[in-house]
Each structure stands twice: as structure tokens, then as C-alpha cells.
Image: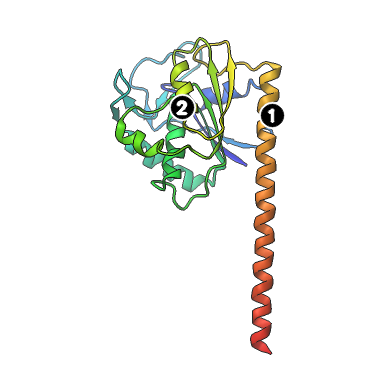
Amino acid sequence: MKILCLHGFRTSGSFLKKQINKWDSSIFAHFDMDFPDGIYPAGGKSDIEGIFPGPYFEWFQFNKEFTEYTNLEECINYLCEYITSNGPFDGLLGFSQGATLAALLLGYQAQGKILKEHPEMKLYVSISGSKFREPSICEVAYKDPIKVKSVHFIGEKDWLKQPSEELATAFENPLIIRHPQGHTVPRLDEDAVQKLKNWIQEIFLLFQSTSTATSEDDAKLRKTIKNEEESIIV
């Protein structure tokens, strides 16, 4: 299974990869993880300067209230093309701006606005994600509960704690994993690791049962076609 991983504001794909790699390696052992860089170079100072080498990137720009966005449509178009060209992808993972953007893509796909020819995503991992606040976006992306299996990491000291809580409500039966840290990809304790492993196992079982059902349907269809062809010959 393949997951597209979207980094946070003014960081990079390689930085998010380094952070996720700190987690128990068995969690995503059976996934192909893709960590692209944002479409735009960072337009200002990065919070990880001096911690991790650049260059740094951002997916789109926004105002202080997070109600107005610049280059968002261009970003969405870019990611749809990326997903189509490099997929299919089974799910999305994101941190902060990346998680917010990933949830938007899932909501738009569910409403038939984008990725109409791409298979429906099966999973979503949100770390410090939030909703967009512009009404015209909300009315589409979060119109109905998003029926993608989701897990939401929410930090007690995260300045986006409440927005992360609100984002989780946009999904059907979300799994919420809380941690005592702030706005970061958290280090996971044993309990969090086990919850995440169980969640992933559920997805694999669901994926296998769906694949089996599809294979059985295909076999029945082939048998029906064969019988019809034999009837025509007779």
C-alpha cells in the first residue's frame, strides 16, 4: 500500500521523513511512503532553521486568521497531477499544513470535485491538522462525514489542539491518539504504538476482504461471459 506524506509549513519532505522514521519501524513496514517537497520555496524564516538543513518549502500561503489563501488552487491541481502520475495512493499522511491540505483533498474527492478517476483513499493520518475556515471550502470539503479511516494525533500543548479536535469531527469514526507534547510529530509511547498498529491491522484486513470480494466478483463475471459465449457457439 502506498501513502503520500505532506510536510508542514516551511519545512520539507526529507524533514517529515526523518520525523516519521523515529517511530517504531514496524508501524509502516508494509507501506511505500512518498515524501515530496511543497510546490513553493519558503517565503520566510523556517522554524527548523539550525535544526535541519534546507531548502524549505510551503504548499500555499495564508493570512493570519487562516481565512484567506494564496496559491491554494494551484497547489491542489499540482497534487492531483502528482497523485495521478505517481499513484495510485491508498492514503495520505500529513503534519500541520500538510495534514490540513490532505484532509481537504479527501473531502473534495469524497464530494466528486477532484481525483474522480483515482481510487478512493482508504486511510488518513493527521498530525496537528486543522480545517480550512473559508466558508466556500467548508461547504464542500466537510459537507458530509469523510468516510476514510482516520487517526488524529493531538498534542495537549499544541497551539492547534482545538482546531485538530474540530478536524477529527469531519471524519467518520476517527481514532484520536493524544500526547503531552506540542506542535510536533510526537514520539510515541507503547500505548500509542499499539493503538496505531491495531488501526493499521484493521485497514489491512478491510483491504484484503475488499480485494477478495472483488476477485470473486471478477471470477463470477468471467464465468458468466464464458457460459454466454459457449451458449452462442452451441
Question: Which quadrant does the C terminus fall into?
Answer: bottom right
Q: Nearer the viewer, residue 31 or 138?
A: 138
Q: Name the residue under label 1.
A: 197
Crowding at dot 2, Cα within 10 Å, few <14 / some 14-19 / many 20+, comes out as: many
- Which residue is found at the position 37% from the left and 42% from the top? 77
As drawn, 11 above or below 90: above
Q: Where is residue 38 in the image (x, y as percent from the top left)?
A: 42, 30
Q: Which of 116 and 31 is in front in this view?
A: 116
Q: Where is residue 42 in the image (x, y as percent from the top left)?
A: 37, 23
Crowding at dot 1, Cα within 10 Å, few <14 / some 14-19 / many 20+, comes out as: some
What is the count of numbered marks? Answer: 2
Q: What residue type is labelled 2?
A: Leu
Tell me where residue 61 sits by quadrant: top left
Q: Which amino acid does label 1 sit on?
A: Lys
As drawn, 179 above or below 220: above
- Which residue is found at the position 67% from the left and 76% from the top? 226
Q: Mark 2 points at which residue?
A: 167
Q: What element carries label 1?
A: helix
Could you tell which of marks 2 and 1 lies nearer the N-terminus?
2
Q: Is mark 2 on a helix, strand or loop?
A: helix
- Which residue is found at the position 53% from the left and 11% from the top? 156
> Is 26 left, or right, of 180 in this rendering?
right
> Is 65 left, or right, of 195 in this rendering?
left
Instruction: Check whether the beta carbons of the residues at disc 2 and disc 1 lie within 8 A of each other.
Output: no
- Which residue is found at the position 33% from the left and 34% from the top? 72
> Is 154 left, or right, of 191 in this rendering?
left
Q: Where is residue 52 in the image (x, y as percent from the top left)?
A: 51, 16
Question: Which quadrant does the N terminus fall into?
Answer: top right
